[in-house]
Image (spheres, grey):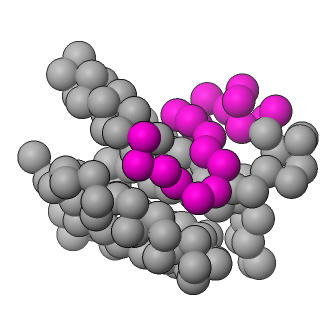
Amino acid sequence: MKLTTCIIDDDLVSQFATRYCIQQSHADFEIITCSSGEEGLQVCVDLFETENKLPDIIFLDLIMDGMNGWTFLDNLQNLFKGKDLPSVYILSAFTNSYDRTVAKGHKMISGYIDKPLSRSCMDKILSEEEKNRSQS
């Protein structure tokens, strides 16, 4: 089954590294890349309107100009109340220990990853996603 993955990060190098890691996982992915929280939210709205679904996995940077990752999460939750929300993995440099603490306890966040995304971390995510889908 093809999984739709959305990378939301304003750093082009990080986008490239994350995309590359996902592609190297050998799983079947459609990868959507967004450079801002606003663009990521619009992609979610468009995907829901055209295909009646949201991305399966979102890799989200927290620190971005304009709409940051926290605001993106709030908006996603408000726009899609009662819908199956994506698994969200925070992909951040975590220079702020407060962000790491909040990410650990946030109900919408499936995990947090220090940049860059590694192959072993991607394998763990895929394993977790397969387990979650088999329980649904």
Q: Is residue 133 above or below residue 4?
A: above
User: Which residue is painted at 61% across and 29% down in the image?
Assistant: 107
Q: In percent of the image, x 57 and y 79: which residue is there?
A: 13
Q: Look at 62% across and 40% down and name the residue there.
A: 112
Residue 134 coordinates in the image, percent (x, y):
18, 22
How many numbered marks appear? 0
48 to 27, vertically: above or below: below
Q: Tell whether 88 sits left or right of 75.
A: left
- Residue 20 visible somewhere in the drawing: yes
Residue toward you, 79 or 89? 89
Which quadrant holds residue 100? Answer: top right
Q: Is residue 67 left or right of residue 45?
A: right
Residue 25 horizontal side relative to residue 91, left or right? left
Where 103 falls versus 95 (above or below)? Answer: above
Check the image and name the residue furthest to the top.
135
Is residue 97 or residue 48 the one in the foreground?
97
Point out residue 9 in the picture as x, y percentages from the top left corner. Answer: 59, 71
| Residue 74 appears in the rendering | no
Residue 56 x/y as whole percent = 32, 48
Q: Is residue 95 magenta?
A: no
**Magenta stretch, residue numbers:** 101-120
In depth, the one of 135 and 42 nearer the eye is 135
